Amino acid sequence: MKLSERLEKAKKPETKGIEMPNLMTFNPNVEKTDKYDNIKKIVHRKVIDEYNKEIQENDGNEDNVDLRQIINDILIETGEPLPKIKRDKLVQEIYDDIVGLGPLEPLLRDNDITEIMVNGPRDVYVERNGKIEKTGVFFRDNNHILQIINRIVSPIGRRCDEANPMVDARLKDGSRVNAIIPPLSLTGPTITIRKFNATPYQISDLIEFNSLSFDMAAFLEACVKGRCNIIVSGGTGSGKTTLLNVLSSYIPDNERIITIEDSAELKLMQSHVVTLEARPANAEGEGQITIRDLVRNSLRMRPDRIIVGEVRSGEALDMLQAMNTGHDGSLTTAHANSARDLIARLETMVMMAGMELPVKAIRQQIASAIDIIVHQSRFRDGSRKIVSISEVTGMEGDVVTIQDIFVYKQEGYDGTGKIRGKFVPTGIRPYVADKLRDNGIVVKDEWFSKR
């Protein structure tokens, strides 16, 4: 029966006296959970067998109410009674498995979840409100996980197999995905998803989360509008990309912005944005386009601003050179344990570019290119805070000098395990304040007054 015929039949009233044919049989002695799974498998298989072509033509459109109707009709044909709650649950699970990411879909829909970690078919964890917890979600087996991985990476032209056993990818909403499979992962295929809000955070959200103070936010806004070169540093999961996205929102709408990322995650609201994404090598080891290649290419694209999602290697040299050759107002992130540690990390990354530069020359590049370092940390209670905003002031001898403008002073934890502390200015008026005022940006001395 075709899709249109089945839907038409569903609209007609039932004829009394005609018994609904029982198309499927089940073992009456199985446990309730096994019975539910048995029904689910049979309905799922019948939907695929009969309607695979229509599903493919629909290309996984989530608004396809017809598919839900088909699943429900086939479920009725089984003749197996299920309570409405279980029936709706089963229909949704089969729908998610056919056009979505299967067991991951309810986790992706939960706005309280920020990270999803699949360690195995029955080992699925999430980070909710800063805390990691195990879920009741499970996959059928390792092959089921592999199917979901392929469903994630195929639309963006990537692959994950024995020849390429690890891959970075992204979902349609920008969420970041990493997958790694055997032989590299000895426990089986693993998925890690860093979720991103459908609506990007604003600076007001970060103030409400107590991630920074109002004065810190005002100063950072002035720095972005005044075309300061800014690096956001921090550890894994500290919120660097989220903060970078918030800072980028201050860029005027009439500027041409080039964003460069491994996997496109930034969600800029400006009208003139060009998004570039790195490309891994193909199965033959050819065709790789690196972040460094894209940074170099962006200089030929007449950018007003260059935003690099993260510098990890030799692209740091190209980024510093761009900042030093008229492309001011650039933004990026990097992994580091502190603002001072970031300077050392940048030195190492520049050396990875393969250029035989003296250490002093590298430090001079860093000192003249970077204006502001914003360091962010993730605390034991799951909260994320800007722990320092520092200014790069130049060099003394062979050492790059920095000074803190704002810091977070930790005062311990309360009885519920929540961190206690406060954001305070150091009392130092930054040198960059004069540059900002010369550019017509309002800078208030009270932001920096020690209290």
Image (cartoon, rainbow, N blue to C red):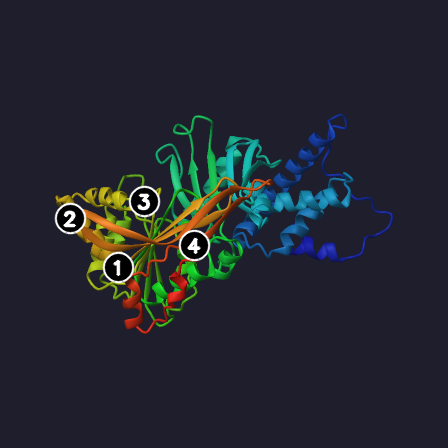
Q: Secondary structure at mark 4?
A: strand
Q: CA distance from mark 3 to mark 2?
A: 41 Å
Q: Going 67% across and 34% down the picture, which residue do you hit?
A: 37
Residue 383: horizontal and vertical position, in percent?
50, 46
Kindly identify which residue carries mark 1.
Answer: 298
Amino acid type, mark 3: Pro
Q: Nearer the viewer, residue 400 or 247?
A: 400
In the picture of the structure, the residue carrying the numbered disc 2 is 397
Nearer-N-terminus badge (3/1): 3
Looking at the picture, does residue 6 appear above or below residue 302? above
For marks 2 and 1 on the same chain, the one whose residue lies earlier in the sequence: 1
| Callout 3: SS | loop
Left/right placement of residue 275 relative to residue 356 reads right
The amino acid type, in three-letter code, at marker 4 is: Val
* Comparing labels 4 and 3, the label whose residue is closer to the camera: 4
Q: Earlier in the sequence, mark 2 or mark 4?
A: 2
Does dot 2 land on a helix, a strand or a loop? Answer: loop
Q: Please identify, in this view, whether the residue under mark 3 or under mark 2 is nearer the observer.
A: 2
Residue extending farthest to the bottom is 440
Q: Which residue is mark 4?
A: 424
The residue located at (39%, 61%) in the rendering is 449
Q: Are marks 2 and 4 in contact (CB under 8 Å)?
A: no
Q: Amino acid at mark 1?
A: Ser
